[in-house]
């Protein structure tokens, strides 16, 4: 049994949370460059230039990239041969609390969805655990913006809707809500599993690197096709018209019941703040 | 697509010449307010009270910034989504508000009020919180302090980069921009 202290988790997460709010990951920066090279609308190019300049200013570490510093979402993969000394869940929450407080980030989390009192420190973070082989702890972190999250959708399609049904649902989702989600977007798509699993798949996909294609060539081709279809919608950067609406469509799949075809679309904005640490 | 440098307060003449797609660098005093501050402003008007800001010719920015670092004027300060303010905007236009800065589509009622009252809707780049914070030279809470990050703020801006996304002639760039590029790659 390898042993780590819960305090190490807090420290690492605090550092990662602050860093991500200010420094957009390099894969996103490369996507912005590619977008500027392909965008045909002059208004769209102006918006993309502002997005690049914004990233450069934020990276200096004084002002966060976006004022909505998001909901902290964490996928924790815990190795079965690892022992965390102390309370892992509390350590994760404390890491998020410190990141949002010490990093001068916005606290957007309400203690109750209807009575709407702010918790004041952006906790609780939303944490998903998985037990995995090995003796490491991997934390995949995302600071997920609220505006883009609101444009996400889920459907229990009929199996007969098939591949076309899934693809149309994705394109429809972007067509309806894309303009309000701060495009250019990274679109996370979950297919299969069941009602709760498909939402989780979509979230994983939305936080995956926009440069990583699905390992299965069938789904990798679908990702490319959907990207092209979404970009033909004409929505463009910030919805003002143009040829770059999405930077990537990421698909994650899981086996499902023979009567089911669940699909979920989790929309991520250009403030796609993702990163991971391994302890 | 024309480019203008404008200073607040905005006049009818300045607003009338603006067309969707125009680029504007805005300077002067603007007011920062979101949902809760809008609600209070409109409630004050409905009670017949004078609002705590100079509404005539004013521009309201829908923004909820991050907390400033010590010694800084403001944190990241990009626009929030406009539709949540649609219920309040027409009432403010009635009393002389001339401009709104935010992101995202507006309701038909807001668009109609912009035509009737000669007002303009500027789009700021969503998510460009760091870039925009550089244009904000001064920021202070002027009312509703108890709302914290949602308090009503007076801001002095310099060359705030904006796009006209809704004009007083009924133009809507969210509809027309998309139409112009639909089907193209
Ligand atoms: S949708 Fe994303 S980029 Fe836009 S304001 Fe929200 S977090 Fe920022």
Image: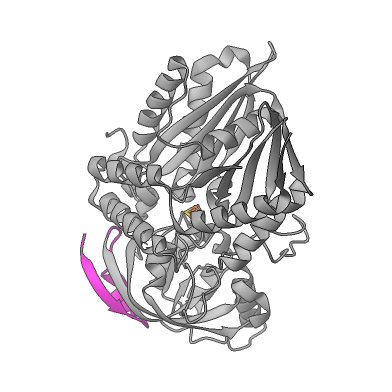
Estimate the x, y position of residue B47 in percent, counting from the top left: 67, 83
The residue sitting at 64% across, 28% down in the picture is A198
Q: Quadrant of the C terminus of chain A?
A: top right
Asked whether residue B4 is drawn in magenta, I would say: yes
Coordinates of residue A65 in the picture (x, y in percent): 45, 59
Could you tell whether A207 is left or right of A85 in the image?
Answer: left
Compared to residue B9, the image places residue B63 above or below, namely: above
What stretch of residues is rendered in magenta?
Answer: B1-21
Q: State whether residue A71 appears in this view.
A: yes
Q: Is residue A252 above or below residue A78?
A: above
Image quarter of the N terminus of chain A: top right
Compared with B25, A220 (above or below) is above
Residue drawn at point x = 45 percent, y = 15 percent? A218
Q: Is residue A123 visible?
A: no
Q: Nearer the viewer, residue A165 or A124?
A: A124
Q: Quadrant of residue A243?
A: top left
Query: In x, y percent, where is residue A122?
Result: 66, 60
B109 sits left or right of A260 in the view: left
């Amino acid at each position: 049994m390898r042993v780590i202290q819960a305090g190490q988790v807090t420290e690492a997460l605090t550092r990662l949370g602050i860093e991500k709010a200010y420094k957009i990951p390099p894969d996103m920066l490369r996507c912005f460059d590619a977008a500027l090279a392909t965008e045909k609308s002059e208004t769209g190019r102006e918006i993309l230039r502002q997005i690049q300049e914004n990233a450069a200013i934020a990276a200096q570490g004084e002002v966060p990239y976006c004022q909505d510093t998001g909901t902290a979402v964490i996928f924790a993969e815990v190795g079965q041969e690892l022992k965390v000394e102390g309370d892992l869940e509390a350590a994760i929450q404390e890491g998020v609390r410190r990141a949002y407080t010490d990093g001068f980030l916005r606290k957007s989390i309400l203690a109750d969805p209807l009575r709407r009192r702010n918790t004041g420190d952006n906790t609780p973070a939303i944490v998903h655990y998985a037990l995995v082989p090995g003796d490491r702890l991997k934390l995949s972190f995302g600071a997920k913006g609220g505006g883009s999250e609101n444009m996400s959708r889920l459907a229990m399609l009929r199996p007969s809707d098939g591949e076309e049904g899934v693809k149309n649902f994705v394109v429809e989702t972007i067509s309806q809500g894309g303009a309000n989600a701060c495009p250019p977007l990274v679109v996370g798509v979950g297919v299969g599993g069941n009602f709760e699993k498909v939402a989780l798949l979509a979230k994983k996909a939305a936080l995956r690197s926009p440069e990583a294609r699905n390992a299965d060539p069938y789904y990798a081709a679908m990702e490319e096709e959907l990207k092209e279809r979404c970009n033909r919608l004409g929505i463009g950067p910030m919805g003002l018209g143009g040829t770059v609406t999405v930077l990537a469509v990421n698909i994650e799949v899981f086996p499902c019941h023979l009567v089911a075809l669940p699909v979920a679309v989790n929309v991520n904005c250009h403030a796609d703040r993702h990163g991971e640490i391994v302890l | 697509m024309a480019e203008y440098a404008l200073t607040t307060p905005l006049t009818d003449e300045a607003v009338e010449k603006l067309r969707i797609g125009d680029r504007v660098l805005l300077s002067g005093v603007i007011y920062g307010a979101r949902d809760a501050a809008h609600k209070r402003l409109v409630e004050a008007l409905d009670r017949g009270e004078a609002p705590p800001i100079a509404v005539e010719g004013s521009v309201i920015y829908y923004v909820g910034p991050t907390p400033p670092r010590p010694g800084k004027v403001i944190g990241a300060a990009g626009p929030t989504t406009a539709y949540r303010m649609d219920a309040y905007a027409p009432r403010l236009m009635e009393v002389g508000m001339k401009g709104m800065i935010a992101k995202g589509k507006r309701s038909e009622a807001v668009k109609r009020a912009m035509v009737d009252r000669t007002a303009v809707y500027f789009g700021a780049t969503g998510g460009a919180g760091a870039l925009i914070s550089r244009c904000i030279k001064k920021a202070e809470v002027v009312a509703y302090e108890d709302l914290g990050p949602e308090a009503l703020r007076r801001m002095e801006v310099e060359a705030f980069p904006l796009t006209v996304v809704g004009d007083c002639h009924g133009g809507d760039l969210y509809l027309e921009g998309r139409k112009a590029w639909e089907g193209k790659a």
